[in-house]
Image (cartoon, helix red, strand yellow):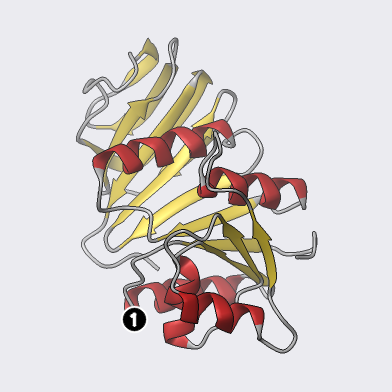
Amino acid sequence: MSTQKCVSAILAGPFFGRAHLAVLDAARTDQTDVALIAVDRGIDCLHDQDIRPTLAVGDFDSVSAEGLAWAQHLTPPAELVQVAREKDFSDLDLALRLCCERGSRDLLLLGFIGGRLDHQMAVCGVCARYAAHATIRIIEGVQKVSFFAAGQSCVVETGTCFSVIALTDPTLVSISGAQYRLDHSRIAPLSDRGLSNRALRDCNVSVHEGLIALFTQSSQPLV
């Protein structure tokens, strides 16, 4: 995987066909060079669509034998980074670490929302750890989750419903141009204080201290 990749799209499962393909097509349109990283069962997702991964990572405990053999026998073969099942980090953590080490600073995650709640909470925690090193987005249908660390800010478009969830203590946030505004306000971790806001105009969300997950909702599938 080259350090020259503009975007790294990291895929787990399940893979929802057209919706995810639209996201990948949009990424390819905006950025000419997109690295596709399959995390474990994500290999099967790409195999089903006959899309070559740039890199496949994980302990490979959930990928099918057929999918793994397909990745191994591509010409040229995909790069595989396999780790032991007994480990103290997740496959996603490994994927994000490799992307950051290799210079990718725009990370798009697909297939990480849904399923077990403990997995989803851990995904948010892992992404938060890398938020200071890369732009990280999780996209699934009409929902997008982005992660921001202290000193970072973003603009939420007019009319968008959004929630700001603090992931560390302390977390200080300012929100302007929204129905509910904050000014260097402290939000407790996993608090509902930043839940269900709306941008009255293009509004600004700034993180002064700590880490947040910004959840946005759209009326149409996000691409």
Quadrant into which the N terminus falls: bottom right
Quadrant into which the C terminus falls: bottom left
Taking depth in this image into account, of 179 and 43 the one nearest to the observer is 43
- Is residue 204 visible in the rendered image? The answer is no
Q: Where is residue 196? Give x, y as percent.
A: 19, 35
Q: Where is residue 197? Give x, y as percent.
A: 23, 34
Q: In the picture shown, does residue 141 fall above or below 100? A: below
Q: In the picture shown, does residue 79 fall above or below 177? A: below
Q: Where is residue 20? Give x, y as percent.
A: 39, 72
Taking depth in this image into account, of 108 and 77 the one nearest to the observer is 77
Does dot 1 land on a helix, a strand or a loop?
Answer: helix
Amino acid residing under circle 1: Arg
Taking depth in this image into account, of 120 and 7 the one nearest to the observer is 120
| Residue ID at (25%, 67%) | 220
| Residue ID at (50%, 19%) | 210
Q: Residues within 10 Å of mark 1 (few under 14, many from 20)?
A: few
- Is residue 197 visible in the rendered image? The answer is yes
Q: In the picture shown, does residue 67 fall above or below 90? A: below
| Residue ID at (77%, 52%) | 102
- Relative horizontal placement of residue 47, taking residue 83 as reference (left or right): left
- Relative horizontal placement of residue 149, taking residue 182 as reference (left or right): right
- Relative horizontal placement of residue 113, taking residue 64 as reference (left or right): left
Occupied quadrant, residue 119: top left
Q: Where is residue 90? Give x, y as percent.
A: 51, 43
| Residue ID at (50%, 88%) | 50
Q: In the picture shown, does residue 187 fall above or below 206? A: above
Which residue is the site of mark 1? 18
